[in-house]
Amino acid sequence: MPARNNIHVPGESWPFFSWSIIEFAIVIAIAIVISWQVNPFFEDSVMSYGWECEQTSQITDCSIADEETVNQGSLNWIFWGIVGAIFAGWYMGARRFVLKRKIL
């Protein structure tokens, strides 16, 4: 049989952008796991007094809580800030040295 030039070879036709997607997924997963493990260390620094509110008909009576509680909004900012720092650190710094190629 004669050789044909229309044979599908997976190694040659694998889309290059899919390697970027795989790299992105790995980096974001590692960043989220690291941030998830580090986040409990910041709970003591985001303690604050919240509000205790009680509503009777149309009147809402609010007072400052007796005990400190963890401010979840601040913990979310810290969590995603750590994820962003790891993500930016990989793409702006470490990737150039590890993979030896330009970002785009």
Image (cartoon, grey):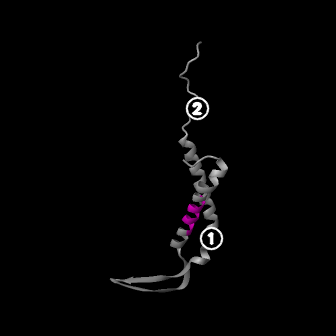
In the depicted structure, whether residue 17 falls above or below residue 30: above
Magenta-drawn segment: 78-86
Q: Secondary structure at mark 2?
A: helix
Who's the residue at 62% across and 70% down the image?
40
Q: Secondary structure at mark 1?
A: helix
Which residue lies under the disc numbered 2?
Answer: 12
Q: Quadrant of residue 91?
A: bottom right
- The one nearer the camera, 52 or 78, is 78
Which residue lies under the disc numbered 1?
Answer: 40
Residue 34 picture location, percent across and down: 63, 61
> How many numbered marks, from 0 up?
2
Q: Are marks 2 and 1 in contact (CB under 8 Å)?
A: no
Which residue lies most toward the top here? 1
Sequence-earlier tag: 2 or 1: 2
Who's the residue at 56% across and 46% down the image?
20
Does residue 95 appear left or right of residue 72 in this picture? right
- The one nearer the camera, 54 or 35, is 35
Spatial separation of the CA atoms under disc 2 and disc 1: 46 Å
- Where is the N terminus found, in terms of image quarters? top right
Q: Provide the major secondary structure of the magenta segment.
A: helix
**Which residue type carries mark 1?**
Pro
